[in-house]
Image (cartoon, rainbow, N blue to C red):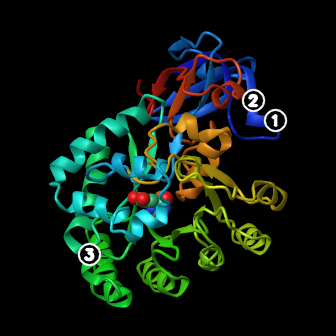
């Protein structure tokens, strides 16, 4: 099939957005065969079926590279408490926070987890999203961590969306291990990681490096096991304070360091050297009413690739909109793919998956400009409408 009369944001080449006005795309077998100015369409494609895109903008389909979209319950009451003045850490230390979601997730069946996740997934699909990352981390016991990851895989069977999973057993210390973090890692987290990997449930390994969670030395134990298993790593780092997670992530050549509000110049240089993507999560920044913005200018100056994601989770980012998170097309296409270790999506180029979004706009700037408006005209997943 040929898509013609389109403006392409290819995300390749020297032009901003790799913009090609009057562009055409040749698709076959779920892949992009050719992308470029319609006038240069090779003759071999001329007799394919043609579709007029009506001058609309075509981009790579958005990729949400950081979500906790599988979880039990909600934390709306806690949000209210925070509006009344309690801090995120105060709520967490009072037994709320992540641990209240752990209780709700442990109490849910896999069918419940899937049923509650799908409407959130559908909200992302409605904005054209074709790939999502989904983390475990609200089970914190062997069974529930695996149940979360099985649910994540089930999403990819229930909906036309590609799912990449991250094992996040090092997200919080469950109440039965309070004060015994090392024992939790040895007895639950690491064995669950191995079991989940053996079941083919793990694409990457993540952790939460924070004073209310795990120290860099503790995360390093998890990363070392990931390395032994041949799995890439990523890390929630420097979100609420500076603890050294970013440097650790860079040392392990992590796919991404996420949040990174408190990253320093030294961290920035380390990310640049390791090619690690900085994933910014404006939903959490907003919800937690954070004041320390990530060092975006330094990231840019040092060439650290920046991605953006929803962080969809019930506590710090109850957001199911990639358009609201984006503010830079590269952050939800090319760089988001890179944050997941994927090289077959995020750009319009030969060989890439035909995961496309067609928008009722003329220029990519309109996508990040409007707030709460969805101009998606059509979503193409693996070459199919
Ligand atoms: N950082 C976050 O923002 C989320 N997890 C994490 O490690 C918060 C998760 C939650 O509050 O439920
Ligand atoms: Fe997160």
Query: Marks 1 and 3: CB-CB under 8 Å?
Result: no
Query: Marks 1 and 2: CB-CB under 8 Å?
Result: yes
Give the label on residue 254, or none: none
Give me the residue at 30% from left, 44% from top.
Answer: 117
Residue located beneath label 2 in the image:
19
As drawn, which residue projects farthest toward the front?
84
Camera-near label (1 vs 3) is 3
Crowding around mark 3 (Cα neighbors within 10 Å: few <14, some 14 to 19, many 20+) is some
What is the C-alpha distance between the residues marked 2 and 3?
45 Å
Q: Is residue 167 above or below residue 101?
A: below
Give me the residue at 51% from left, 84% from top.
Answer: 220
Residue in the foreground of this view, choosing between 287 and 366:
287
What is the C-alpha distance between the residues marked 1 and 3?
46 Å
Disc 3 is placed on an element classified as helix
Give the label on residue 195, or none: 3
Crowding around mark 2 (Cα neighbors within 10 Å: few <14, some 14 to 19, many 20+) is many
Residue located beneath label 1 in the image:
15
Query: Marks 2 and 3: CB-CB under 8 Å?
Result: no
Is the residue at mark 2 in contact range of ligand 2, meaning its CB lies under 8 Å from it?
no
Sequence-wise, the earlier of marks 2 and 3 is 2
Residue in the foreground of this view, choosing between 340 and 121:
121
What is the C-alpha distance between the residues marked 1 and 2?
6 Å
Disc 2 is placed on an element classified as strand
Give me the residue at 52% from left, 87% from top.
Answer: 217
Sequence-wise, the earlier of marks 1 and 3 is 1
Q: Total label count? A: 3
Image coordinates for residue 73, horizontal then vertical, percent: 26, 50
Q: Is residue 286 above or below residue 148?
A: above
Camera-near label (2 vs 3) is 3
């Amino acid at each position: 099939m040929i898509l013609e009369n389109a403006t392409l944001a290819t995300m390749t080449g020297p032009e901003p957005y790799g913009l090609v006005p009057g562009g055409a795309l040749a698709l076959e077998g779920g892949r992009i065969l050719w992308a470029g100015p319609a006038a240069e369409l090779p003759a071999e494609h001329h007799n394919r079926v043609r579709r007029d895109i009506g001058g609309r903008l075509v981009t790579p389909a958005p990729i949400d590279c950081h979500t906790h979209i599988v979880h039990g319950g909600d934390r709306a009451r806690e949000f209210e408490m925070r509006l009344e003045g309690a801090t995120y850490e105060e709520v967490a230390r009072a037994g709320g926070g992540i641990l209240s979601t752990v209780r709700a997730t442990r109490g849910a069946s896999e069918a419940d987890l899937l049923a509650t996740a799908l409407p959130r997934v559908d909200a992302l699909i409605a904005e054209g999203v074709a790939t999502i990352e989904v983390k475990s981390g609200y089970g914190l016991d062997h069974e529930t961590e695996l149940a979360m990851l099985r649910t994540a895989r089930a999403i990819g069977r229930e909906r036309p969306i590609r799912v990449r999973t991250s094992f996040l057993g090092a997200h919080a210390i469950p109440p039965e291990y309070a004060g015994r973090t090392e024992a939790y890692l040895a007895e639950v987290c690491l064995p669950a990681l191995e079991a989940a990997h053996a079941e083919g449930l793990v694409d990457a390994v993540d952790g939460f490096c924070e004073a209310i969670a795990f120290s860099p030395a503790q995360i390093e134990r998890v990363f070392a096991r990931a390395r032994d298993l041949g799995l890439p790593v990523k890390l929630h780092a420097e979100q609420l304070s500076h603890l050294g997670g970013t440097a650790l992530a860079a040392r392990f050549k992590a796919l991404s360091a996420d949040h990174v509000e408190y990253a320093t110049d030294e961290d920035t240089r380390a990310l640049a050297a390791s090619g690690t993507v900085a994933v910014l999560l404006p939903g959490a920044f907003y919800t937690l009413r954070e004041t320390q913005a990530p060092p975006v200018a330094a990231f840019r100056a040092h060439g650290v690739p920046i991605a953006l994601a929803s962080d969809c989770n019930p506590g710090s980012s109850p957001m199911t909109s990639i358009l609201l998170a984006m503010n830079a097309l590269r952050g939800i296409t090319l760089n988001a793919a890179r944050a997941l270790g994927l090289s077959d999506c995020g750009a319009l180029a030969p060989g890439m998956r035909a995961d496309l979004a067609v928008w009722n706009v003329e220029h990519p700037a309109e996508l990040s400009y409007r707030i709460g408006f969805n101009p998606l005209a059509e979503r193409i997943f693996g070459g199919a409408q």
